[in-house]
Image: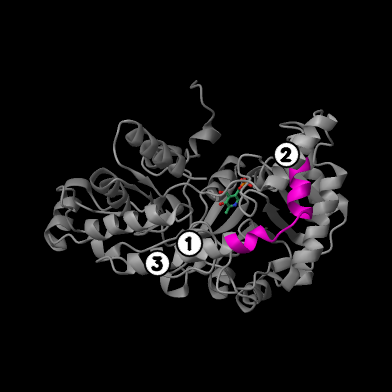
Amino acid sequence: MGLVARTLERVKPSATIAMTSKARELKAAGFDVIGLGAGEPDFDTPDNVKQAAIEAIQRGETKYTAVDGIPELKRAVAEKFRRENGLSYKPSEITVGTGGKQVLYNALLATLDPGDEVIVPSPYWVSYPDIVLLAGAEPVIVDTKLEDGFKLRPEALARAITAKTKWFIFNSPSNPTGAAYTEAEIKALTDVLVKHDKVWVLSDDIYEHLVYDGFKFTTPAAIEPRLKGRTLTLNGVSKAYSMTGWRIGYGGGPEPLIKAIATLQSQSTSNPCSISQWAAVEALEGPQDFLKDWVASFQERRDLVVAMLNQAKGLTCPKPEGAFYVYPSCAGVIGKTSRGGKIIGNDENFAAALLEEEGVAVVHGAAFGLSPFFRISYATGIKALEEACRRIQRFCAISAEAGDAHARYEIQHGKPDQGQDHGDPQRGGDSHRLRCDSRRHHARSERHHSRT
Ligand code: PLP
């Protein structure tokens, strides 16, 4: 009997954490590395929020609290949902956890049984399929296309739904693509979902405030009130308030779900940090005007990165509506040989050679379930971004031609594995389960790690 549980064999460690650590190691060893892997804003937490935490400590708010959040925070969250999303939740319909990730984890663990299916559009935030696998259920991956702005089409959603579908996970603006759905695009999806009354919707709105060019954010439960009774609207303070280390996330949903989440939380972590909860009250209730400057700064960086990457030979970079990521295609570089003599057979080779030869750390697309792409986080200073993009341009200006190198690569290594099993005939070929053959999955996991 091995030490590690079989369930854990289905799960991968974090790819960006792996990439960030590798970049950090190289930096510590004296290499000139620019890290574009991390999924957090580079701004400091606002001073009023820090002050609220200091005052909470001084008031002695340092004891256990109610498992799923202090009443003051639940009220602040309910008010936020009302003010910003037009959604009305009672405090008993609000849950607070240690990051949005815990709320997501608890919601899935509390509701999934073996055999249940969860629809996850790809490219996805890697925690989605892995948490589904941890819960013993099956992620059903539905690929989106660059030509569609990486947005799921309603026909593809309809085809992916079966009698076993328990959840549909929706994330806008998206990690890793930055794509954000307009009201009409969400309505097209909710029109499909209203017809399937057994399917629950998990809307991950964590990047809500990071949208550009005046884009209007909205969320499924607000667009289609008939879905509100089977939707968990997930959010948190990590991204909008630059509070990733404070670990506060929250969700609004029907009471039975919120209660089930609390039961699970009561037998694992208990309450999220008491001090962070008071800081989150201030984040939600305090001044919001700093956000304008942050958004303007992110927009400027996005525009720079998109323009420079589109000048790189072999790359195509769509301009996303939100978050702080871009997800360029590197299809035009696949099959070529880098200046350093590395054959770029897939996006993982691309990211590895880019780090090794130009000192730029990005995360390969296979980690997010869609190749050949890579993800850049532009939550870093504009000078570093400019330099990184110059290096990427230089890296891509490789001349050795594809055919031969590609053929050679495939002869030596077999066809590049995109980390997916395509073509589930029942679903018309555009969705597929992430197979749970643990050996195969495990072997793959050594190459494709997840991210945060
Ligand atoms: N959802 C998405 C899409 C994310 O990218 C992240 C963090 O990277 C989270 C949720 C969770 O964030 P946290 O646990 O810090 O609230």
In terms of secondary structure, where does tag 3 sit? helix
Q: Residue 285 in magenta?
A: yes
Q: Are marks 2 and 3 in contact (CB under 8 Å)?
A: no
| Residues at circles 1 and 2 in contact by the CB criterion of under 8 Å | no
What segment carries the magenta color?
A: 276-293
Mark 2 within 8 Å of ligand 1, using the beta carbon: no
Q: Is mark 1 within 8 Å of ligand 1?
A: no
User: Which picture quadrant has residue 429?
Assistant: bottom left
Quadrant in the picture for residue 277: top right
Q: Which residue is mark 3?
A: 306
Distance between mark 3 and mark 1 Cα atoms: 12 Å
To which quarter of the image does residue 196 belong? bottom right
Picture residue at 79% right of the left edge, 54% below the top: 285
What amino acid is labelled 3 in the image?
Val
Give the residue at mark 1.
Answer: 177
First in sequence: mark 2 or mark 3? 2
Foreground of the two, 291 or 65: 291
| Kind of element beneath mark 1 | loop
**In the image: residue 393, left or right of residue 73:** left
The residues tagged by marks 2 and 3 sit, at their Cα atoms, a distance apart of 35 Å
Disc on the earlier residue, 3 or 1: 1
Label 2, residues with CA under 10 Å away: few <14, some 14-19, many ≥20: many
Q: Which residue is mark 2?
A: 276
Question: Which residue is depicted at the point 78% across and 59% down?
Answer: 80
Q: Is residue 138 left or right of residue 104?
A: left
- Asked whether the viewer can see residue 316, the reply is no
**Magenta: main secondary structure:** helix
Three-letter code, disc 1:
Thr
Position of residue 63 measured from the top left corner of the image (x, y, whole percent): 82, 28
Magenta stretch holds residue 47: no
